[in-house]
């Protein structure tokens, strides 16, 4: 932020797309536009206000963010927003607490994998898919076999059905984490999967301890960042963060953009006579797909870690990396770069230009509707 960062192709493209919107947002325009236009690739940009805030936080801790001048700057940015101004007070910020929550862990093959629990749906959904796949010999099937990806697709859609029905902020709703990861329950879900044909209908099950819920899908946006760091002492950080859409709300306080995470909630409070787990409530955290994971060997040593960016596709990017590394013996680089698979409704979506595209006819013979997208 002090010395400047060089604009790459991605940033130049994103700024170029948003520049017309920023005529009403002078703060963000002042950071990212050059003479009122998107910066050229190779331009160096600086953000001195952000640098000053970061130094202050480093010196004084979290109170430098949640109290005092910065709290007033956040409150003012929202109160004076050019569109939909509203109140977020200094008292709101002072009262906020970041919560340390227990990890969610599950076995897969000879490993133990740990990830993030509610209000993230990442760990439970990834571990459900792995649990459903475990009875299949994914190693022998291999990465180039359409059956491998058919099995992944079937388990994916069953797990996401549970996700959309039961996951939310556990401070507000009862999330049946243990039930979702119950080995007998996962085995019952896995028995719905055939290697020879699609199931066709992918409905949520009834895990042990689940209360009556109605599925409702949030409008999660794929604007995420992830990084992994491992130090010489063996400490591992795997961190996912987001401001939701590109540049969040477009509002700026002290050089940083404010998020628009409200869109991660389901806007319907109830559906079909039952409450929606991820409905909006005051003080509630929205459901996310963040899926940072650490893999431990039989001796409890961390041996692999990953995460991903991309909204609801995060779960599947992490899932395929775990399968590629554990079952297919790929390197970390190869596993992260393995082709991506997702879905829209009951249509399977495969990564355009990847090794999955030639498999589309075979997947269709198994009963899937398949499209390719970049």
Image (tube, rainbow, N blue to C red):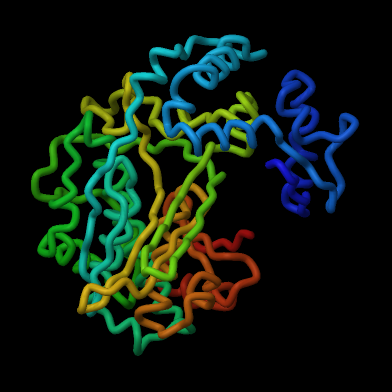
Snapshot quadrant of residue 354: bottom right
* Frontmost residue, 368 versus 233: 233
Residue 9, picture quadrant: bottom right
Please say if 35 is above or below 108. above
Position in image of residue 307 (x %, y %): 44, 59
The C terminus - image quarter: bottom right
- Above or below residue 236? Residue 196 is below
Quarter of the rendering occupied by the N terminus: top right
**Direction from residue 297 to residue 249 in the image, left or right:** right
Above-or-below relation of 4 to 211:
below
Q: Quadrant of residue 296?
A: bottom left
Task: State left or right for residue 129 relative to residue 43.
Answer: left
126 vs 193, nearest the viewer: 126
Give x and y (percent) for residue 108: 24, 72
Residue sitting at the far front: 59
Q: Position of residue 253 (x, y in %)?
A: 61, 24
Q: Residue at x 74, y 48 (%)?
A: 5
Q: Position of residue 20 (x, y in %)?
A: 80, 28
- Number of labels in the image equals 0
Q: Who's the residue at 27% across and 61% down the image?
A: 114
Report the residue at 30% width, 63% height from top: 129
Which residue is located at x 54 percent, y 21 percent? Answer: 70
Residue positioned most to the right? 35
Q: Is residue 257 left or right of residue 261?
A: right
The residue lying toward the viewer, choosing from 59 and 336, is 59
């Amino acid at each position: 932020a002090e010395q400047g960062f060089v604009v790459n192709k991605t940033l130049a493209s994103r700024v170029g797309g948003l520049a017309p919107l920023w005529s009403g947002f002078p703060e963000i325009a002042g950071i990212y536009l050059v003479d009122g236009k998107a910066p050229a690739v190779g331009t160096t940009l600086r953000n001195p206000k952000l640098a000053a805030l970061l130094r202050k936080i480093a010196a004084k801790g979290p109170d430098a963010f949640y109290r005092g001048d910065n709290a007033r700057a956040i409150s003012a940015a929202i109160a004076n927003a050019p569109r939909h101004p509203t109140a977020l007070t200094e008292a709101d910020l002072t009262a906020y607490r970041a919560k340390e929550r227990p990890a969610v862990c599950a076995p897969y093959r000879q490993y133990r994998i740990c990830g993030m629990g509610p209000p993230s749906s990442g760990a439970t959904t990834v571990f459900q898919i792995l649990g459903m796949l475990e009875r299949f010999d994914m190693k022998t099937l291999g990465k180039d076999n359409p059956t491998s990806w058919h099995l992944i697709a079937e388990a994916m859609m069953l797990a996401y059905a549970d996700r959309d029905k039961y996951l939310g902020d556990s401070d507000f709703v009862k999330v049946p984490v243990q039930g979702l990861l119950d080995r007998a329950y996962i085995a019952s879900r896995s028995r719905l999967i055939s290697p020879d044909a699609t199931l066709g209908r992918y409905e949520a099950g009834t895990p042990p301890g689940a209360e009556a819920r109605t599925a409702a899908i949030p409008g999660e946006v794929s604007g995420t960042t992830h990084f992994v760091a491992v130090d010489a002492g063996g400490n591992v950080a795997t961190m996912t963060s987001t401001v939701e859409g590109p540049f969040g709300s477009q509002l700026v306080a002290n050089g940083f953009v404010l998020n628009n995470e409200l869109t991660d909630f389901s806007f319907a409070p109830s559906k079909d006579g039952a409450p929606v787990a991820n409905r909006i409530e005051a003080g509630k955290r929205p459901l996310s797909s963040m899926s940072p994971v650490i893999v431990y060997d039989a001796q409890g040593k961390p041996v692999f870690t990953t995460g991903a960016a991309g909204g609801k596709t995060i779960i599947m990017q992490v899932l395929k990396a775990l399968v590629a590394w554990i079952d297919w013996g790929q390197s970390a680089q190869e596993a992260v770069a393995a082709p991506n698979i997702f879905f829209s409704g009951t249509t399977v979506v495969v990564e355009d230009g990847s090794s999955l595209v030639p498999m589309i006819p075979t997947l269709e013979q198994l009963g899937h509707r398949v499209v390719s997208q970049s």
